[in-house]
């Protein structure tokens, strides 16, 4: 079994040596940086994309209906439980709501 593993590693190494490797500068030159958006902008965009409003946000979070509007106005921050719920619902990384 060890011989098979060694043969595999040798073959993989030979293949990797033939691939072109890009420097960071070469890789980055054709990439566009993602726009910096606030947590509220991201949340509003995600809600809009699904046709949801502040009341829907409140229902989604399991809170009083007025809290959805309060959150969207920036008068109250999201809790960790809110972030967990939103990441599951929208299928995005928690960092979207923790910026």
Image (cartoon, rainbow, N blue to C red):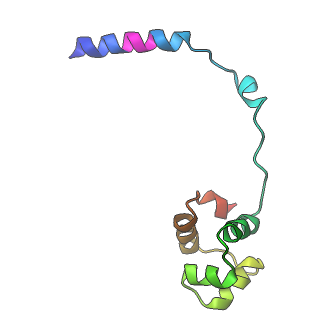
Q: Position of residue 85 (x, y in %)?
A: 53, 71
Q: Position of residue 59 (x, y in %)?
A: 57, 84
> Camera-side residue: 30 or 64?
30
Q: Is residue 80 above or below residue 94?
A: below
Outermost residue toward the front in this view? 51
Judge left or right: residue 61 versus residue 13.
right
How many marks overall? Answer: 0
* Magenta span contains residue 12: yes
Q: Position of residue 71 (x, y in %)?
A: 70, 79
* Magenta span contains residue 98: no
Q: Is residue 68 above or below residue 9?
A: below
Q: Residue at x 75, y 47 (%)?
A: 34
Q: Position of residue 41 (x, y in %)?
A: 76, 66
Point out the image quarter for the C terminus.
bottom right
The kind of secondary structure the magenta stretch mainly shows is helix
The part of the image, by quadrant, that contains residue 12 is: top left
Q: Residue at x 23, y 15 (%)?
A: 2
Point out the image quarter for the N terminus.
top left
Outermost residue toward the left in this view? 1
The boundaries of the magenta stretch are 9-13
Q: Is residue 18 above or below residue 56?
A: above
Judge left or right: residue 29 versus residue 91.
right
Q: Residue at x 56, y 79 (%)?
A: 60
The part of the image, by quadrant, that contains residue 79 is: bottom right
The part of the image, by quadrant, that contains residue 10 is: top left
């Amino acid at each position: 079994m060890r011989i098979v593993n060694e043969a595999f590693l040798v073959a993989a190494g030979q293949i990797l040596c033939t691939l072109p490797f890009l420097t960071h500068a070469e890789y980055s030159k054709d990439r566009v940086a993602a726009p910096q958006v606030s947590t509220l902008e991201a949340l509003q965009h995600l809600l809009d994309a699904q046709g949801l409003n502040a009341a829907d946000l409140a229902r989604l979070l399991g809170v009083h209906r007025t809290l959805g509007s309060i959150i969207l106005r920036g008068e109250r921050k999201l809790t960790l439980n809110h972030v967990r719920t939103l990441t599951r619902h929208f299928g995005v990384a928690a960092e979207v709501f923790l910026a």
